[in-house]
Amino acid sequence: MSRTAILSALTEEQHGLLALLQRPQKISHAGRDFWLGELLGKPVVLALSRIGKVAAATTAAALIEQFGVARIVFTGVAGGLAPGVQVGDVVVASGFVQHDMDASPIFPRYELPLYGRSLIACDAALTALLFEAAEAYLARTGVGFNVSSSVPVQRVHHGLIVSGDRFVSAAGESAALRSALQSAGHEALAVEMEGAAVAQVCLDYGVPFAAVRTISDRADDQAHGDFALFVQTVAGRYTDHIVHGFLDK
Ligand code: ADE
């Protein structure tokens, strides 16, 4: 059966799934640990990219070239950009834009040079399954149910996530980012640092890709503290439930 890659940036986002992995086998490659095994009887490989677009692209290429994965699912946390996207919400990506790509005036702002596009859409079928799994998790736990003492799961959103090599940690920066993207026709729900790079590698190789991110902070002046607290307390728990539900489908 074809193998699914489940990719995260941080150990905290992965450890719940790693604990559930059946017949685990660790393989070190390209300076990373890849965990082969089964979840719900399905072959998977769990990988940690570390942070940033280059690290994520290297990991995605290794998953495809070395491990022959049939699909890649990214799971982790993100900063909320759109007003309704709050800490504890879940965003299932419809597609990705690199918010720090700017080869203007040679190419339009955000356009990937020589790709003729700035937005890379996620695989529709995988995305629909992830969305269903996220909604089912929400329905099971219920709005306001505390998965930690302080952070309830609130809403599942579906829309654009933007990525760049920058932790967005000021309200002014977050507003400027959102409005610059809007001027180019992109309504961004959340920001993180890896997804668009994985999307680009998957586009190049023709491998289906989907991503789910839990909102750890609002990319504002409190982002640093909120992010650290969220990652230490709840990030991995969302991952277990949503990815598990996804694999069950
Ligand atoms: N991942 C989680 N929060 C983020 C933020 N504020 N900026 C970039 N990546 C993030």
Image (cartoon, rainbow, N blue to C red):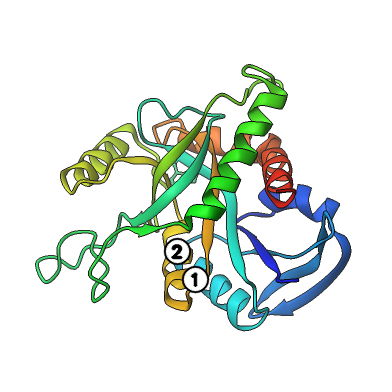
Q: Check disc 1 and give the amino acid type.
A: Ala
Give the label, 2 or 1, closer to the camera: 2
Q: Residue furthest bottom?
A: 65
Query: Which part of the image, by quadrant, shows the N terminus?
Result: bottom right
Circle 2 packing at 10 Å, graded few (<14), some (14-19), many (20+), is many
* Residue 177 visible from this viewpoint: yes
Q: Which mark is residue 199?
A: 2
Instruction: Please give left or right for residue 107 compared with residue 54 in the image.
Output: left
From the top left corner, tell me how far across and down residue 20 is, in percent.
84, 51
Q: Which quadrant of the view contains residue 213?
A: top right
- Viewer-proximal residue among 78 and 31: 78
Residue 122: image location, x then y, percent: 45, 56
Precedes in sequence: disc 2 or disc 1:
1
* Percent x, y of residue 147: 71, 26
Q: Residue at x 54, y 32 (%)?
A: 226
Q: Residue at x 62, y 71 (%)?
A: 70
Q: Which mark is residue 57?
A: 1
Q: Residue at x 71, y 21 (%)?
A: 149
Classed neighbour count for the residue bearing mark 1: other residues with Cα under 10 Å, few (<14), some (14–19), many (≥20) = many
Relative to 210, is 242 above or below? above
Q: CA distance from mark 2 to mark 1?
A: 9 Å
At 48% from the left and 77% from the top, the residue drawn is 205
Q: Is mark 1 within 8 Å of ligand 1?
A: no
For badge 2, the amino acid type reads Ala
Give the left or right position of residue 59, taking residue 80 as reference.
right
Tell me the tag on residue 240.
none
